Image (cartoon, helix red, strand yellow):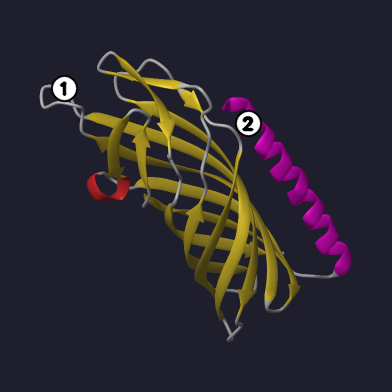
Amino acid sequence: MRTNCIFSLLIFFSLAGFASQASAAGGHSSYLALKGGIYSPSATFNLDNVDIETTFAGDTRTGVDGEIAIGRFFLPSLALELGAGYFKGKGSFDAEDETSARRQVDFTVIPVILSAKALIPAGPVAPYGELGLGAYFTEFNVTDNLNTFSGTTTFGLHTGAGMNVGLTQNVFVGVEGRYVWANPSFGEQKIKLNDTEYALNGFTLNGFTTTLAVGFSF
């Protein structure tokens, strides 16, 4: 997981530097945005050999979400944005019998995403819609389990909408809602529950992120 994170950040900052240089050369407006908020999982998962289906968002707390992004306007109403961040979620499911403990599930994700944003400039206010894709690096943990399960690189889609409000010529704030579709694979890794091993099956990262942002144009 740590290697994947470092690799993702290297890609991000390399592309960010390239985008900044290209923007300066072409005279287009660019921006840097810092985002923070919550991640609300909406999908279910189950384990191989036993029918356990639990909606993460239904019985657990939502997790945190953060992102740093750099964008470039190709037109006044069209921008491309590259971002890297972090989000996590929690879930739980009932054990096989009433005497066994309820298990908690924790998963953390490092996303590297590219988004196309279509804006409607209206003075200092700019509502927008977005569509994009990303690479997601996932770790999965279960309470009382000594193993950490690292998923393979997962490619997924997202769509969303938001609004930016200019405070000055170079500073803006915003709010953004996004829905993510991604299905990580954990290969042959097993989870041991009540002395029985199970393979992860059907776990997805599908869910909503809701963030507030502060941005700086340059």
Residue 206 lies, in percent from the top left, at 44, 51
**Residue at the extreme left:** 99
Residue at 58% x, 86% y: name it: 122
Q: Residue 192: say if magenta.
A: no
Q: Residue 7: say if magenta.
A: yes
Q: Which residue is mark 1?
A: 100
Q: Secondary structure at mark 1?
A: loop
Q: Secondary structure at mark 2?
A: helix
Q: Which residue is mark 2?
A: 4
The residue nearer to you, when weighing 22 against 155, is: 155
Residue 124 lies, in percent from the top left, at 57, 81
Q: Amino acid at mark 2?
A: Asn
* Mark 1 closeness class: few <14, some 14–19, many ≥20 residues within 10 Å: few
In this rendering, position of residue 38 left or right of residue 172: left
Q: Earlier in the sequence, mark 1 or mark 2?
A: 2
Extent of the magenta region: 1-26
In this rendering, position of residue 144 left or right of residue 6: left
Give the prevailing secondary structure in the magenta stretch: helix
Q: Is the N terminus in the top left, top right, bottom left or bottom right quadrant?
A: top right
**Of marks 1 and 2, the one in the foreground:** 1
Q: State the mark number for residue 203.
A: none
* 200, above or below 43, in the image: above
The residue nearer to you, when weighing 86 against 149, is: 149
Residue at 63% x, 69% y: name it: 117
